[in-house]
Image (cartoon, rainbow, N blue to C red):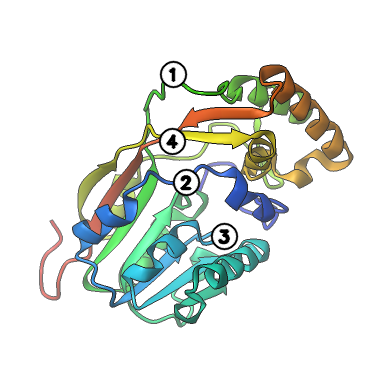
Amino acid sequence: MVDGWEWDETLFSGSAAYYARGRLPYAPGLADVLTEALGLDGRGRLLDVGCGPGTLALRLAHRFGEVVGVDPDGGMLAEAERGAAGAGVAGKARWVRARAERLPAGLGEFRVATFGQSFHWMDRDLVAARVRDMLVPGGALVHISDLKGEARSIDGLPWPAVPYPGMEELVKRYLGPVRRAGRGVLRNGTPGGEAAVFARAGFNGPERHVVPGGQVWDRVADDVVAGMFSMSYAAPHLFGPRRDDFETDLRRLLHRTSPTGRFSERLPGTEVFVWWKPPRGAAVR
């Protein structure tokens, strides 16, 4: 858990409806990389912890016999249910409203557990230990995030780049200089050091895989606005009665940057760390 900050149910309040449209996808090829690294064959069960609107679970659903997404935000799970129906996997997907700290929650055993840019919001040592107990011997915990420290060039883009620095300054003008998160603030950002947490929990590893990004992704102004409201630090409720004013100023910034309302950027690479639960009788290394 982040020092000086406590989770509350407003963390992503109002953001779920913006997620699918606004968030950049993981790098193409992620499912194939995971299939090869984990030996997936369409069988077994996947537990996606902090699943949000099913971004990761739905992408992997055809690689498992069943997927179970866990998230404390009801709006996110409603979006996940809609996404599963649209993808034709509703029959093999289950969505459970619960905090990760409440696991195992009677959900049974799993072959793989994934954390897609969600682990930093949790009581990490507690959750890692509980997820380990839910994995079958030889099962895998997979931590997935955008590739850290990656420079994404804007050279050669067909449309103007999304003005992220200006957008961040606009958020600070409305919400203050310290990053907001639910009812609290994150003075030092979210924590890192996941490797030490997973090692303490008794996992072996990690195996690191990088799925290359850099592909050009075209967007329109509505996509960029949705992306902003999908972020915890700019969730709609944080702006209170000034929400519409913020959106108006955001759209003015976007129009100044690109009068056509079209933008381009490059997809980030995706970084994957695979941690293994030792087979029965094997020692933790």
Q: Is residue 145 visible?
A: yes
Q: Is residue 199 visible?
A: no
Q: Earlier in the sequence, mark 1 or mark 4?
A: 1
Closer to the N terminus: mark 1 or mark 3?
Answer: 3
**Marks 3 and 4, how far apart at CA:** 20 Å
Q: Residue furthest left?
A: 282
Q: Nearer the viewer, mark 3 or mark 2?
A: 2
Residue denoted by label 3 = 53
Which element carries disc 4, helix, strand or loop? Answer: loop
- Disc 3 marks which amino acid? Pro
Residue at figure coordinates x 65%, y 55% from the top left: 16
Q: To which quarter of the image does residue 145 belong?
A: top left
| Mark 3 vs mark 2, CA separation in Å | 13 Å
Q: Is 149 rendered above or below residue 278?
A: above
Is 99 or 75 nearer to us in this picture? 75
Q: Residue at horizontal 67%, vertical 63%?
A: 75
Residue 25's tag is 2
Whether tag 1 and tag 2 are in contact, CB under 8 A, the answer is: no
| Left-right relation of 74 to 2 | right
Residue 19 or 259: which is nearer the viewer? 259
CB within 8 Å, label 4 to label 2: yes
Above or below for 7 versus 132 = above
Among numbered discs 3 and 2, the one appearing first in the sequence: 2
Kindly check if marks 1 and 3 are in contact, taking CB atoms under 8 A apart as contact.
no
Residue 282 in the figure: left or right of residue 259: left
Q: Position of residue 83 (x, y in %)?
A: 56, 65
